Amino acid sequence: MAISLNGQWLLTCVQRSSISDIPVSLPGDVHSALLSAGIICDPYWAINEAKVQWVSQCDWVVYRSFELTADELACNAMDLVLDNLDTVAEIRINGHTVADFSNMFLRHKVDILPCLLVGVNRIEIVLHRADLAAQSRAEKLPFPVPWAEGNNQIPHMNTIRKTQCHAGWDWGICLSVMGVYGDIELQPIQHVRISHVSTRQKWQEWRCEVEVTVHYEAVANSGLASVSVTFDDQTYHLTLDRTAKQATVLFRIDHPKRWWPAGYGKQRLYELEVIADGHQIHKKIGLRKLELCTDDDDIGQSMVFKVNDVPISAKGANWIPMDALPSRMNNQRYRQLLEDAVAANMNMLRVWGGGMYEKDIFYQLCDELGLLVWQDLMFACALYPATPDFIAEVQEEVQWQVRRLKDHPSLALWCGDNEVIGAIGWYPESRQNREKYVVNYERLNRALAEVVNIEDPARRFWASSPCNGELDFGDAWHDDRRGDMHYWDVWHSGKDLDAYRKVKPRFCSEFGFQSWPSLPSVRTFVPEKDWNITSPSFESHQKNSRGNSIITEMFTRYFRFPIGFANMLYLSQVQQALAIKTASEFWRAHKPVNRGILYWQLNDCWPVSSWSSLEYSGRWKQLHYHVRRFFAPQLAAFVPNDKGIDLHLINDSRKSAELKGEVVWQSWQGEILYREPVNTYLEPDENVVTWQWLAEDLERHEADGFFHVHLTSGQEVIENTYLPLRPKQCELVEPDLRYEVAEIHGQLFVMLSCSKPAFFVHLEYAGDGRFDNSSFTLVPEHQKQVKYLGPATYDELVAGLTIYHLYQSYQA
Ligand code: BMA
């Protein structure tokens, strides 16, 4: 049985003798230990980031002792196994150096039996400065390889295999953390070392064959090892052949219950257990077919994931590491974030290449919840070396990661990197010598593809995100005919929101719009005296140099300027929601041309102004409430075009749906100027136009009011609003909005009504929890009963509730 070395260790600073023997809990990081010990201030508060930079400019030693009995040492090998060791480290056992490591994405394994003693042993991990290691590697490169300048605050991070955003990003604090973030274990080995267990599915019409292979290595001088393999309720026992490296057994599952992405069916998982030489490996296997289809068509090339032969409209967001302080990553927060993704009707997340290959729990939860995973390999926004050493190192890394993750049914795609093809065009060296850097790119990318193709031939390797296709080094930021697209013309290039309606991406894997955090979140990192957009504290939590200017400048284009700090925060979230909604609805209305919408970004790794829809605290921004509506399986979307406005009804589900209700043209005073019933039956995967309003009619009346659709489908209410003019041009009136908190059968609700229409009505509770709906249009004929989901009592909710709406945001 494995012996865990997780738990309490001690920490000493090599350069500052006054800092020694500080308790550190591993898995965990150095900064968190120093914070707990009161040695550093909270790096997330105000302008403290700058005050803690010295930590990563020191070397640190973490150490502990542990006892072993003679019985425990009676084995043929004792592997020390470390996961997520960050990054440049030397391991010493009882004073002997047993290994030097420098890749945080590898599982490190070293046999330390010869150094171990019966009784007390000491393990020390020396964590060296990453910045110096990066610098010295850069100096040895045959030619300069540009690093992620603009995002990273520390140069040459592209030369070491460490989470790239640790050195800062355009939403990320720069801490350059160090530590061990995965389990630390001793694994005694009698006969065989199990390297991994892999599965393969072969599909026939009503049967799935599951091939399970145990990969192992016999240890010198040992005897025979037996292994048992159980799938579902069938078990095989075998004796491993000492001269071989793998053993395979085959299971036949007739009429399997298939695994589906969320919104398409259930997530049935079968249990697989392998027991060998005292080791137990447990996996949950989903049986499903999955392919990425990229077929030539009239436009260019499709890009669609098919699961069990059904084309999927991928809907989701980009995932970044959950916390800049790895000690704070925990299973409960993983669950919360991923459940919130599913609650917003997502079925895919992209694990972005500047972060980390996620922890096992992430993929286990994605399997359980039906979230497909677009998995980038960990390279982002810089160029990377293609020297033999670097290639060998990353091939080993990718081999390990593919072996670790490939059996997850949620895993949909391996993608070589984030924006590295594009980055060839960003830096002066590579711009001036493009061929050289393209060849350099292709050498590394090819080497990654080779490993993926050997280890996981059933899955597609996609060179880069974005990418126009095989060996295509074109501009995937602007070509919407094929491949995946990163569409940043609105945020980074300052175009109007209408620009989202000028492209029809086949699969948009990034597009985003920033907002500021909500007032309750701002309270947690900005002192009240600094509650101002341009205060140093607030600005140091905005890492995109033009970010705050873009947000305020866009206010002036679309909205009447908000009054006061709280309304500025509120309006920034309205604006973000409007941007992402505009794009998502337009692209969904172009199904099947479009088959993927992943916005930038789901989450935050510290409290910051960013593109996220979930704040660092987990609080839903207004965008997340909109996502829940515009990613719903059934959507009613108003789509303006040359002829006028179309109302699309879209059904992504495998089941048909019946939508009933009406579309109205309503004045700002709430008068119904026009109404038309809607009664539509939608086939599975259908997208139809049910109603149109002609441009001539619109031009004459565009200032008079807005369109609102209200439909029901079973228990579901489907609503949407369309303002023909920019909100600042609309003559909104005081809606006379009333609300009341009510407790019904122990459940808290907020009842809302109004006498005139109110827009972007948003409920904000100062404490924990969220609502089942927010940031909606409230019209006099449909009062709303909004459920509060959280721990607050009636009195707390009443005291801590603020209701915002658009008209009030500019009233003095
Ligand atoms: C993208 C990402 C990130 C970045 C984001 C916002 O292209 O890949 O590098 O944080 O843009 O600028």
Image (tube, helix red, strand yellow):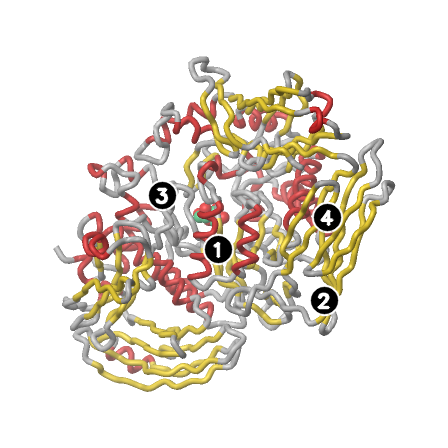
Q: CA distance from mark 3 to mark 1?
A: 19 Å
Residue 179, how many percent across, how many down? Answer: 52, 30
Toward the top, the furthest residue is 17
Between circles 3 and 4, the one closer to the viewer is 3
Q: Is residue 403 left or right of residue 175?
A: right
Q: Which mark is residue 253?
A: 2
Can you identify the residue that label 4 sits on? 450
- Can residue 514 be seen in this snapshot? yes
Q: Amino acid at mark 4?
A: Glu
Residue on which disc 1 sits: 510
**Distance from Cα at disc 4 to Cα at disc 2:** 31 Å
Q: Is mark 1 within 8 Å of ligand 1?
A: yes
Question: Label 3, on which residue?
Answer: 608
Earlier in the chain: of badge 4 and badge 1, it is 4
Q: Residue at x 32, y 35 (%)?
A: 45
Q: Residue 202, percent across and down?
A: 74, 64
Image quadrant containing the N terminus: top right
